[in-house]
Amino acid sequence: MKIGVDMGHTVSGPDYGSVGILKESECTREIGKHLKNFLSSLGHEVIDCTVDTANSVAESLAKRVDIANANNLDLYISIHLNSGGGQGVETYIVSYGGKAAEFADKVQNKLAGLGYVNRGIKVANLYVLKYTTAPAILAECGFVDSKEDSHRYNAYNIAKAIAEGVTGQQVVDEKKYYVVTNYLSAAWEGYAGIDINSILNTNFIGTKVYLRNDAKGIWIETEYMDYNKAVELKEKLGTLFFSIKED
């Protein structure tokens, strides 16, 4: 299939996404990056319909639809997160019946299977659903202002659920991931040494690590691990965390 992926909202300006515990525009791009990789790995052609900057909401929406319609898609997916005090996931279509509803049903079941409250499939006259010529769905992947949804949020798992929902295929991720820390701080002020034993025993028990250095200082890189384990370590590291890298 030729699938359009729209990471909803812009990264700045009038169409910037909702902000709560999470930031929608950041989350949609995290999800979209993984989704594009998964769909490509499953043999599908991916068209990026994302718009990062626009002078108005109307311009942002029109640009997304123009990209989609210019590429004769088999499916258009718009990624969003909700706001307003609710909880859970829902998937929008412009009307019941047809291919869009079939895709939406499968995606919704996969997203709810991650543990979210299942808010079901909704019909709405949303611009990107109404004016995209291909079957189109809009996935609301949790609420940015919900403590429960924010705690459950995992861009990798959400993207995997969407990819498996629309394709009916199982995602097998063959990439290798590892965690990189920030530069390590001195054990205390005025002392140049690093208490490496404390850092390792607090954060890396059971994980093989490597010390790396450059002119700026020393940091830690872990052994390869699956993505979800890397995310768990990220949460554990707190301010010591720098990034999750992939090979």
Image (cartoon, rainbow, N blue to C red):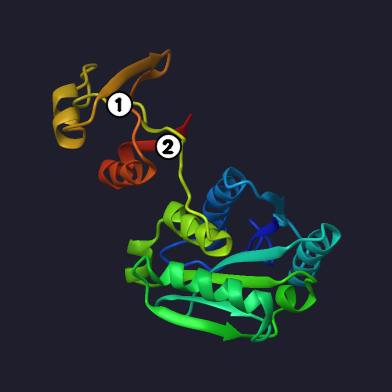
Q: Total of numbered circles in the picture?
A: 2
Give the SS element for disc 1: loop
Q: In this view, does 208 lie above or below 73?
A: above
Q: In this view, does 242 lie above or below 85?
A: above
Q: In this view, does 24 lie to the left or right of 58?
A: left
Which x, y percent locates residue 219?
34, 23
Does residue 82 appear in this view?
A: no
Which x, y percent locates residue 176?
42, 32
Amino acid type for the residue under numbered disc 2: Ser
Within-10-Å neighbours for mark 2: few <14, some 14–19, many 20+:
some
Q: Residue furthest right?
A: 70
**Image quadrant assignment for residue 181:** top left
Does residue 48 appear in this view?
A: yes
Q: Which of 18 and 170 is in front in this view?
A: 170
Q: Nearer the viewer, residue 225 or 234?
A: 225
Amino acid type for the residue under numbered disc 1: Leu
Q: Is residue 37 above or below residue 93?
A: above
Q: In this view, does 48 lie to the left or right of 210?
A: right
The disc at residue 243 is 2
Identify the residue under disc 1: 184
Residue occupying the point 46% across, 55% down: 155
In terms of sequence position, does the residue under pointer 2 or pointer 1 come before the other?
1
In what quadrant of the picture does the N terminus appear? bottom right
Q: Nearer the viewer, residue 192 or 114?
A: 114
